[in-house]
Amino acid sequence: MGGDAVGRLPKGMSIAGVVGFGWQHPDMNPETWVAVAAAVIALAALPFNWRSARAAERQVRAAEAQTQLQQQLRADAAQPYVWVDIRPDRAAGTLLNLVVGNSGPTTATHVKVTVDAPLPTIDQLKERVGVAQARLASGVPSLPPGRVLTWPLGQGFNLIKDEGPQPYTFTVTADGPFGPMPLMTYVVDLADWRGVLDRPAGSLHELTTAVKDLAKQIPSSQLPTARAVRQSDLR
């Protein structure tokens, strides 16, 4: 029997008929009549109560799901974002660095970074890079927002092969304000830098602008005039 059929009276029978029958029957006293009427009314209300209960249950589930989603969004927004990369140095474009940083809004703690193979490096930096890998594997106590750790590996032309991929898989584990963060994996392929322009940041225009800004900071009284220069040349 479906939900719509629950509480229906037999065909041809109505609540008024049941009540009238109760009044006319000689064996039914007022108390019995009241009990029968209440039972009939409750039976008729069953489908409405059932539907209301189902609707209320759906509303509760939706509210709980919305609350969980909002809590998850707030937690995700407050998590650190620890990353690792091998990238050219900003000052010397030919130099490749191992870089680990935190771009999230909160401090990451117990930061551990491991790599699936020894990193490439020139002989002069091999010991330094080995120490860096061991330190990252054992764990950095804390990495505040915006902090970047950098270790030089060597010149790109000494590290990048002439052909073929050179992938290195980094695995990062860390704790955030809500406990352990999900394990993160980064695949860095040195071959991506093959043939890339290695010009360091900056340009002649930026240098010219910097010189002009510096000149503005020097008092005009300390700048030599054209006449003073000519007189000094004549001496």
Image (cartoon, helix red, strand yellow):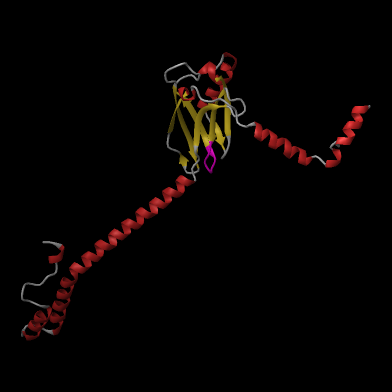
Does residue 47 belong to the magenta stretch?
Answer: no
In the picture, which quadrant includes the N terminus? bottom left
The answer to which of 168 and 210 lies nearer the viewer is 210
Does residue 105 belong to the magenta stretch?
Answer: yes
What's the residue at 59%, 29% (across, down)?
90
In the picture, which quadrant includes the C terminus? top right
| Placement of 96 over or under 10, stated as above or below | above
Question: Residue 110, how many percent across, how many down?
Answer: 52, 34
- Which of the 4 quarters of the picture holds residue 33? bottom left
| Placement of 61 over or under 198, stated as above or below | below
Question: Residue 45, how many percent across, how many down?
Answer: 19, 71
Q: Is residue 89 left or right of residue 21?
A: right
Q: Is residue 110 left or right of residue 207?
A: left
What's the residue at 43%, 49% (across, down)?
73
The answer to which of 50 and 77 lies nearer the viewer is 77
| Residue interval drawn in magenta | 102-108
